[in-house]
Amino acid sequence: MQRIVIVGAGMAGGRAAVELRKRGFEGDVVLVGAEAHRPYDRPPLSKAVLTGRIDDTTIPLTLDGVEVVTGRRATALRPGTLETDGGPLAYDGLVLATGSDPIPLPGDGPVRVLRTVDDAIGLREVLRPGLRLVIVGAGWIGAEVATTAAAAGVEVTVVEAADTPLRAALGAEIGAHTIDWYARAGVTLRLGVAVERTTADGLVLAGGELLPADEILVGIGARPDLGWLADSGLVLDRGIVVDEYLAATWSGVDGPPVVAVGDCAAWWSRRYERRLRVEHWDCAQHSPSVAAATLLRAPGPGAAAADSSTDAPATDAAVYDPVPYFWSEQFGRMVQYAGLADPDHELIYRGDPREPEPPAGTRPPGWSAGWFTADGTLRALVSIGRPMDVAPVRRLLVAGGTVDRKGFADLSVTMKELVAAG
Ligand SMILES: Cc1cc2nc3c(=O)[nH]c(=O)nc-3n(C[C@H](O)[C@H](O)[C@H](O)COP(=O)(O)OP(=O)(O)OC[C@H]3O[C@@H](n4cnc5c(N)ncnc54)[C@H](O)[C@@H]3O)c2cc1C
């Protein structure tokens, strides 16, 4: 393999370049990104960048000997050739790291999204006391922006189609415990309200009501842009379909090896025996090392002609099989989630989720909740302001095993002790 092209210069793309070099690849590495920026971190955009604490979240990556091409968008893919808006690029190994894009709302009103550093700085510049900001979606982004905007004196209304915030991510029961957080921050939360379309004056809600707004932020989720890959021959299904080694498949053509990483990859999870695609920083951070190893091991087109230095067999250690992990900072609380819960799991609480208003100047005590299977296995954890519960549970979820359900609810026993007791 002589020339590896990486499409998408975000966290996952940048990390892929580093991993290729770390694994001794000496050929050309070209990192192509549509944005004008070198790889930067997105989680701070809705936190420290929006509050004005920082402007620059560039990731300190060692990209020596990597050709970084910014402001260049890939437009089509064929075996061996990547078409871009700046001309074609040949490759004999390809990493797809194109992330995901905000889902748009219908309508012709001017709206904002929050995906890029330019979006974040643009939004920050318009936040001022008295501004009527309507946020569509009470998910992670909606909650984080509402937190900062309300603290800046903005009149914030959050409109959510579901009956609780965070319903898709954490389920209705946990989501319901966050409803009060909005009111306490002075944010108006309208649940069960669908939006029909945006207009120049505000939002038209289902039923015809016009909700006036000076600014509208749409935060109803993200999905990978696969349009440019539609005719490529790569197998796609709401993401770039990859196996447990993060290798993509050409259908009907014999193409060079392709891997996918980060938000755009829909990988086969051995652990959960299903296809997963998660939009978590942790995945963008860790999937590239597995993908780089896969790519460097892969035989080129026409397997019989493979170079013997690159055809080492895959081992289980080379499998990408994480326990999903995500965090969010909202309404003065650190929210962390690890694992994968199913709707039929039983929820057990550790601490009181009703959270009485804490005395002024103090933090709420925090609580966690675990999702257990019928046979008593802990499958997922959400923690609100109790980071000490998270690390032991993440280790447990990765290694397998469980904790005693009664002990889980007992705050006098630390989670570390509980996990150690098995
Ligand atoms: C505001 C915000 C806050 C977040 N907060 C958290 C958090 O608190 N915790 C957490 O776990 N996760 C958080 N996330 C999610 C996390 O940032 C993402 O999972 C992570 O950025 C994914 O990295 P990626 O490299 O896969 O994709 P991206 O970061 O999206 O990078 C993909 C890059 O590819 C480029 N690209 C796309 N298409 C093309 C093309 N055709 N040609 C060339 N380039 C292309 C894009 O322009 C982009 O620069 C947050 C995300 C956002 C937007």
Image (cartoon, rainbow, N blue to C red):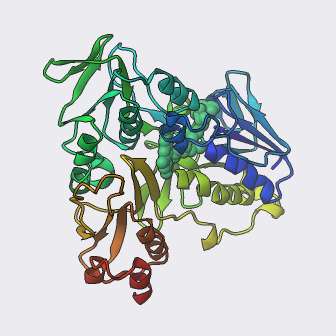
Residue located at (54% from left, 57% from top): 243
Looking at this view, is 29 or 337 the one in front?
337
Residue 197 rendering spot, x and y as whole percentages: 27, 19
Residue 300 rendering spot, x and y as whole percentages: 74, 51
Residue located at (44% from left, 70% from top): 388
Q: Give the mark count.
A: 0
Residue 359 rendering spot, x and y as whole percentages: 28, 56
Residue located at (75% from left, 63% from top): 311
Res. 192 visible in picture: yes
Residue lying at the far top in this picture: please name it.
200
Residue lying at the far front in this picture: please name it.
360
Residue located at (34% from left, 21% from top): 130
**Figure quadrant of residue 286:** bottom right
Res. 301 visible in picture: no
Residue 332 rendering spot, x and y as whole percentages: 39, 49
Please state if 80 lies on the left or on the right of 160 as rendered.
Answer: right
Quarter of the C terminus within the rendering: bottom left
Please state if 165 lies on the left or on the right of 42 as rendered.
Answer: left
Residue lying at the far bottom in this picture: please name it.
421
Q: Quadrant of ligand 1?
A: top right
Above or below 215: residue 235: below
Please state if 19 lies on the left or on the right of 100 as rendered.
Answer: right
Looking at this view, is 416 or 147 the one in front?
147
